[in-house]
Amino acid sequence: MKIILTKDIKALGEAGKLVKVKAGYARNYLLPNGFAIPANQKNLLRIEEIKKQAADEKIALYGKYKEIINKIKDVELTFIRRADESNHLFGSVSENDIVTSLAEKEIDIHKANVILEKHLKEIGTFDVEINFAAELITSVKVKIEGENVDSKEITDNIEVKISEDIETEKEVKKEENTENE
């Protein structure tokens, strides 16, 4: 099926381009979501108009992204997480954490714009890439500080919990024995 793209789509091309795709992909995804229109005579005459409209939208979007990049330049995000003696975090810092922290500073981005190979799981300072478009890339400093948890403290907590469980078990058995008598 031939369609005309109304939005830029990485796998297919830029807005205004005439492309051929499978009918199901066009009917079920591209057309209902407004990413394309059918390539009929009437719409073929509108290709230049679609290209101009897409270019105007792209310019506005790039302006918005440049404003965000200017805001991000001076931002350093700090996260405090529990860590062991070897500075490994018990959790991690993910794209969602970074987006949430930026939102608290009134900088709204989508988590797909945050480029992490894997979640950050160590204490330290990292440069995390924020990618809006091929030529609009910046980075944000992410500092992870540790709330060091001593392994002895963890062991003591486990021992206390085990001894509490044993005491509770003994009390339950005593109650069962007194009920049976």
Image (cartoon, rainbow, N blue to C red):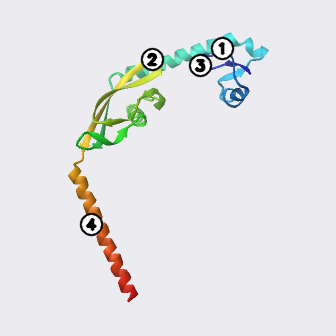
The quadrant the C terminus occupies is bottom left
Q: Residues within 10 Å of mark 1 (few under 14, many from 20)?
A: some
Badge 1 is on which residue? 17
Q: Which residue is mark 3?
A: 8
Label 4 and label 3: CA atoms lie apart by 63 Å
Q: Is residue 45 above or below residue 137?
A: above
Q: Relative to 173, say whether 43 is above or below.
A: above
Q: Secondary structure at mark 1?
A: loop
- Relative to 52, 89 lies left or right: left
Q: Earlier in the sequence, mark 2 or mark 3?
A: 3
- Quadrant of the rendered image containing residue 19: top right
Alpha-carbon distance for marks 4 and 1? 71 Å
Q: Is the residue under label 4 in contact with that under label 2 (CB below 8 Å)? A: no
Residue highlighted by disc 2: 136
Identify residue type, mark 1: Lys
Tell which circle, 2 or 1, labels the residue nearer the N-terminal end.
1
Instruction: Name the quadrant containing residue 41.
Output: top right
Q: Secondary structure at mark 2?
A: strand
